[in-house]
Amino acid sequence: MSLRINDLAPDFTADTTQGTIHFHEWIGDSWAVLFSHPKDFTPVCTTELGAVANLESDFAKRGAKVIGLSVDPVANHEKWVVDIEDVGGSKVNYPMIGDPELKIAKLYGMLAADAGETSEGRTPANNAPVRTVFVIGPDKRIKLTLAYPMTTGRNFDEIIRVIDSMQLTTKHKVATPANWKQGDDVIITGAVSNEDANKIFPGYKTVKPYLRTVAQPE
């Protein structure tokens, strides 16, 4: 069964490059970004893990932790890290989960239940569905899911943009329009009446009766 937005993110215990973690406990009160990879020592994934290493402080500013997953043993990850740092230019300070028995990949619906029980002998093509992103909130519920093809590197600036939007819209009764970025105008949600909007968002603009915009709240 596929995971959907607002589903509880499945909990698990796993070995990582930073020791054993219990996923929900590791998340704590933070936001979390779980991004997965079909195999170690693959070219696109090497650039992705390096890109996240470069952006780790940007995620941290937003109270978001990042964690990678690849369906290979942790010992392989530890060797791969050398290449990732060499290509990306930054040290990988976030944990990388080893999933050699494919348990987490199956738990999160990336691979079918009958995909086998070992990463041994599997190729990146076999593991192509294991190129996903899950953004999980402090409530441990899934807020965003993305799946990417093998040949397209992920845009982690976009994932940061989405986290910005979700954190803003959690605090205020607003939504963000297409291509929104920090500082742009936002949309007042339909749950706010015009009367209340005059009090909460004085000076808002009515574009259509159902589309009201206002400067981004502080």
Image (cartoon, rainbow, N blue to C red):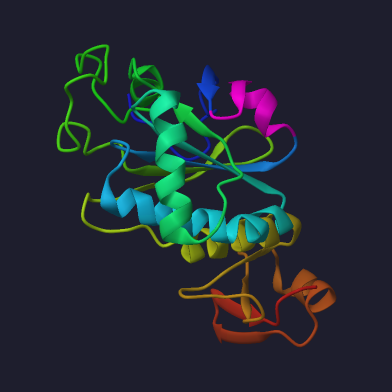
* Left or right: 100 in relation to 203: left
- Membership of 18 in magenta stretch: yes
Q: Is residue 145 visible?
A: no
**Front residue of 132 and 126:** 126
Quadrant of the rendered image containing residue 94: top right
Q: Is residue 82 visible?
A: yes
In the rendered image, the quadrant that contains the C terminus is: bottom right
- Membership of 75 in magenta stretch: no
> Residue 120's x, y, as percent?
22, 19
> Residue 27's x, y, as percent?
66, 33
**Front residue of 181 and 129:** 129
* Left or right: 160 in relation to 198: left
* Left or right: 172 in relation to 79: right
Residue at image position (45%, 25%) is 74
> Residue 134's x, y, as percent?
47, 42
Above or below, 194 relative to 144:
below
> Residue 154's x, y, as percent?
37, 57
Residue at image position (69%, 53%) is 60
Above or below, 202 relative to 72:
below
Tally the numbered discs.
Answer: 0
Residue at image position (61%, 29%) is 18
> Which residue is the extreme one toward the right?
199
Above or below, 187 relative to 30:
below
Q: Which residue range is magenta in the image?
A: 17-28
Quadrant of the rendered image containing residue 129: top left
Above or below, 193 relative to 207:
above
In the rendered image, the quadrant that contains the N terminus is: top left
Residue at image position (41%, 62%) is 155
